[in-house]
Image (cartoon, grey):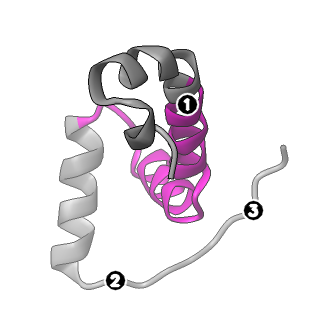
Amino acid sequence: MPKTQLNVRVDEETARAARERALARGMSVNRYIEELVRQDAGEVGRTFVESAADFMKSYESVFAEEFGPERTRP
């Protein structure tokens, strides 16, 4: 996917925090910001919800046995 350049202005404290957090994660500030935007856009959340739904479906019988069938379905 082609990249587009964005220019943003933030205060020095925000810029310092972005640099520190990116460094702590071993990534560039650009990638750090890109990941934050993706998370905010819901890509990570959507993946989590889909994985959780698959997990619950796979283990539905275990939950039903442990908690009763009325607790496994709304």
Specify whether residue 26 is painted magenta. yes
Of residues 41 and 71, which is closer to you in this image? Answer: 71
Say which of marks 3 and 1 sits in front.
1
Residue 71 vs residue 15, the one in the foreground: 71
Residue at point 63% right, 72% down?
6
The quarter in which the N terminus is drawn is top right
Tell whether 34 sits left or right of 21.
Answer: right
Going by the numbered disc 2, the residue's amino acid type is Val
Vertical placement of residue 71 versus 55, above or below? below
Left/right of residue 63 with respect to residue 42 in the rendered view? left
Which mark identifies residue 10?
Answer: 2
Between residue 55 and residue 48, name the one nearer to us.
Answer: 55
SS of the residue at dot 1? Answer: helix
Q: Which amino acid does label 3 sit on?
A: Thr
Counting residues from the start of the chain, the first of labels 3 and 1 encountered is 3
What is the magenta range? 25-54
Residue hosting label 3: 4
In the figure, is residue 40 to the left or right of 67? right
Task: Say which residue appears at 61% left-offset and 50% top-offset.
Answer: 43
Marker disc for residue 39:
none
Q: In this figure, which residue is indicated by the disc labeled 1? A: 51
Counting from the top left corner in percent of width and height, residue 72 is at 45, 37
The CA distance from mark 3 to mark 1 is 31 Å
SS category of the residue bearing label 3: loop
The residue shown at (53%, 62%) is 37
Residue type indicated by callout 1: Ser
Q: In whole angstroms, how far apart are the C-alphas of marks 1 and 2?
A: 35 Å
Residue 58 vertical placement versus 34 (above, below): above
Residue depicted at 60% across the width and 49% down the height: 46
